[in-house]
Amino acid sequence: MTRELAQGSDHHSVFGKFRSCAASTGVLALALAACALSPVSAEAATAKPAPAKAPAFDARRPADVIAVLGAMEAKAEILRKDQGQIFMKVTTPGGGFGAQMVGCDEAFTACKAIALFSAFSRKGVNLAQINDYNRSQLTCRGIMTPSGEPSVMYAALLNGRMTRDEVREHVGVWQGCLTGFGEFIQDPIGFLSRPQG
């Protein structure tokens, strides 16, 4: 009997807690409804819109290529725009080279390809050796300028799916072209006698 009374009192206390909880939940619901109906504060009404996101990287956009070069300590300066081409001068701590973006739209905001190139003042390399150099290389192209200066070039097609890292990789390949071609013009016979990877 005392056990049943004790159980009864337990049930009573549990139900009592449930009733007080339900009552407080009702108060909470009323408070939430009141908040929802209250006018928006002046501060919230005059809140500034979030700043616009920067446009996604696009390797076809000259400004984005220039930004990648800048992050690699290479300053690119546009010299001129003409007939769908953009000509740039690129300066680095170790020297300089030229860049040309081609197949550009009328606004010069999207281009189809880029060529990086550099002429060397050292003469003495002949056209046959330049041809042998080209046969030994997959990506770097040697040419002879009309004034007889050996020159090297690297070109890449551009598309909207390329990432910054992929553009950096192309610049890295170009740096390898500069180093390798520099070694070639110092000693064409020695360079061409070595196995090329």
Image (spheres, grey):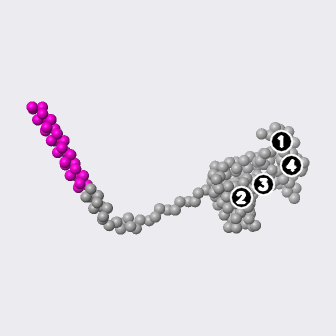
Magenta stretch mostly in which secondary structure?
Answer: helix
Q: Quadrant of the C terminus?
A: top right
Q: Which residues are magenta?
A: 1-28
Label whose residue precedes the other's in the sequence (3 or 4): 3
Mark 3 and mark 2 residues within 8 Å of each other at the beta carbon: no
Label 2 CA crowd tier, 10 Å (few <14, some 14–19, many 20+):
some
User: Is residue 35 rendered to the left or right of residue 67?
Assistant: left
On the image, numbered disc 2 is attached to which residue? 112
On the image, numbered disc 4 is attached to which residue? 130
Residue type highlighted by circle 3 = Ser
Residue at 16% x, 38% y: name it. 10
On the image, numbered disc 3 is attached to which residue? 118
Return the mark for residue 191.
1
Depth check: give the residue in front, 145 or 104. Answer: 104
User: Is residue 65 rendered to the left or right of residue 42?
Assistant: right
Mark 4 and mark 1 residues within 8 Å of each other at the beta carbon: no
Label whose residue precedes the other's in the sequence (3 or 2): 2
Residue type highlighted by circle 1 = Phe
Label whose residue precedes the other's in the sequence (4 or 2): 2
